[in-house]
Amino acid sequence: MFDLSEKVALVTGGSRGIGRAVAEALAALGAHVVVGYVSGEAQARAVVDGIGERGGRAETACFDVADWAAAGQAVTALGKRHGRLDILVANAGIAIDGLLLAVKEDDVDRMVAVNLKGAMACAQGAFKVMMRARTGRVVFVSSVIGEMGNAGQVAYGATKAALLGITRSLAREFARRNVTVNAVAPGFIETDMTSHVGPEAKDQLLAGVPLKRLGTAIDVAGAVAYLCSDEAAYVTGQTLRVNGGMYV
């Protein structure tokens, strides 16, 4: 099961956290993985080297998803160079927290550019390749915050909620081309983005999680791997929640 041999997969934001775990999981299943990043070349290279040491195949690709034209062109060019692009995991994202009365317009614009427009730009580039092949898998990495909301994360939540609407619309738009489009909505995951949470705040978070633990990037990677597999060929337009039961 979950055999991705001969597949080419692009994971944006693949140099750390959830993106890194996804890249490693897809490579372990046989895919040739392209680790997309915009900064942290050493981290991206470490991911590729680690995959290679375990017998997998991977490479890096540096481009800014927030640059619509450049991102779309980079993804399409990647597909042309490899002769295929079977999987896109649009994972790149940023979180700039703040209550509405303190939110800065520049911060909102930045999150929209990366989290929302960046995902759309990469999808547009990928679809140009996948439509011709009449097959493909696209997975958007959303968040539980996009579903249940959270005080102090109004702009972040808005961008992640928008990804769920994009997922449903694109699933209908490209189903006739045999391209599935789904999303994963992680809960609170142990990554760099949550490392600043103090013990007291962490206890408060866990109080709302029935499984009583934070998730791991590997938990999310397993869900993404399923959605990218042949076993999920009849699954499209769906959001797979990986949140320990905190939102059902």
Image (cartoon, grey):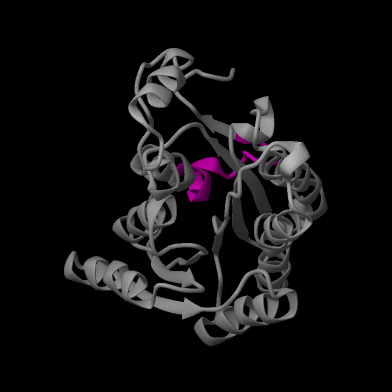
Q: Is residue 94 left or right of residue 1?
A: right
**Quarter of the image where one finds residue 55:** bottom left
- With respect to residue 75, does 160 lie above or below? above
Q: Nearer the viewer, residue 173 or 109?
A: 109
Number of labelled discs?
A: 0
Placement of the C terminus among the 4 image quadrants? top right
**Quarter of the image where one finds residue 93:** bottom right
Was residue 234 drawn as part of the magenta stretch in this picture? yes
**Residue at coordinates 46% horizontally, 42% vertically from top-left?**
226
- With respect to residue 220, does 82 lie above or below? below
Placement of the N terminus among the 4 image quadrants? top left
Q: Is residue 17 visible?
A: yes
The x and y percentages for residue 16 are 38, 58
Q: Is residue 25 left or right of residue 55?
A: right
Q: Nearer the viewer, residue 151 or 33?
A: 151
Q: Is residue 130 visible?
A: no
Q: Nearer the viewer, residue 4 or 94?
A: 94
Q: Which residues are magenta?
A: 226-239
The x and y percentages for residue 222 are 39, 41
The x and y percentages for residue 199 are 33, 26
**Residue at coordinates 53% horizontally, 87% vertically from top-left?**
81
